[in-house]
Amino acid sequence: MADPKNASTKQSLPPSEIKQSLPPSEIKQSLRASATPAGLKSTGAKSMAELMAREPTSFKVFKKGEEVEGTVKKLTPSEILLEIGAKSDALVLEVDKTNLSNLLSSLHVGDKVKAVILSPEAEEGFPVVSLRRALDNLIFADLERLFKEQENLEVLVEEPTRGGFFVSSKNGLKGFLPNSQTLSDNLTGKTINVKITELDRQKKRVIFSQKATEYITDTETIRKLLPKGARVRATVLQAASYGIFVTVSGENKKLIEGFIHISEVSYDRVENLVSLYKKGDAIEAAVLDVDPENRRVNLSIKTLAEDSFSTIAEKVKLEDKVKGTVKDVKSRGVTVELKDATGFIPSDKIPAGTVYKVGDMINVEVADVDKKRRVIVLSPIVTKTFVGYR
């Protein structure tokens, strides 16, 4: 039986003195036992590294730039958290207010989204991720829907640029509005309704049209509704020096924009379209083709009329002598009104010293019938003989 006195004395000794009181063989055995974790003893692993390799971990290790899928766990203006399988929830980093607002309006708690790792582990121990790519996917998915279904979209006209305006939608998407696709002037700073007419995600190109909200602008649809050669009734919107802008009725009470170039108004020379055509005038015209750039149809008035020049050209013969009235006098020549046509005397055919005035009745001779330029070239008949002296 052990002496209680000695036992208490032994237990009160410090560990170093206890070890010193043990035989050397027992000290080595004791050190080995204390240095070996219980896990290594139970598993048979020879090192801690081997033990950790054998034990499956419940969280993932990520790399910077890696795309991961996560579940929205918290969604507030001050904090967005994702569960991505890491030790702790990932914090979404977004400093842009527009993007943050889009995320808050587009996502819901429980949604699964794709995120990009910005930092696998911040100083506080949690991963930091970005949802910019996911936001782009959401925005373009919505744009593709609007483009496919041709729904209206509200945009702000930010500033003018060459050929049009830069505009932006509420979700921060920027695009281009061509001048040819606007309905009014002074748009800068205004919020307007538009439709998407061109969408290319790869090039990040979005083209809008204000006209498309009231007009049919799809070129294939225009071709089907107004085939080449079709006869249409149009209403004048505006007459300019170079042509007439008109509207043609389409389908579902929507209009198609049309344009008649000055060369397609008449076979004869037209001087002043603005005085000839007023807003609201009804005219008949024939379809020539579709202008894909301006998304409108090109029309012709003269195609429906008889070409009077062809008839006249058949009747007029070279060297015919006719009478006419001076209609216009210019440096390049004199325009003469004939009985059934209009002729022209080039300046190089006018004798020196001869002066013509508007309203003069003159005798002329047919010098040429230019079918390409659609003009009857005339030459004055000299009635006086000049006698020279020796």
Image (cartoon, helix red, strand yellow):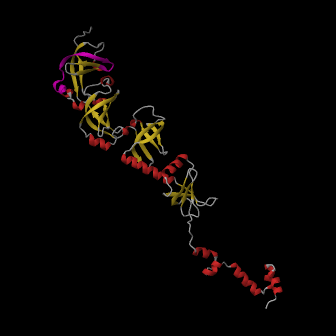
Query: In the picture shown, does residue 190 fall above or below 107?
Result: above
Which sits in the foreground, 145 or 239? 145
Question: Is 324 left or right of 277, judged from the image as shown?
Answer: left
Q: Is residue 255 visible?
A: yes
On screen, 56 above or below 290?
Answer: below
The percent position of residue 243, horizontal first and vertical second, equals 33, 29
Task: Name the foreground residue: 179 vs 6.
Answer: 6
Q: Is residue 312 magenta?
A: yes
In the rendered view, tell whether residue 229 sits above or below residue 24.
Answer: above
**Where are the magenta residues, as a range?**
311-333
- Residue under the image location 44 percent in, 50 percent down: 140
* Relative horizontal placement of residue 372, taking residue 108 as reference (left or right): left
Front residue of this view, candidates 366 and 16: 16
Residue 120 in the image, given as x and y percentages of width and height: 58, 61
- Please provide percent x and percent y for residue 288: 27, 37
Asked if one can make out residue 202 in the rendered structure from this viewpoint, the answer is no
Q: Which of the two residues, 89 or 249, is positioned nearer the viewer here?
A: 89
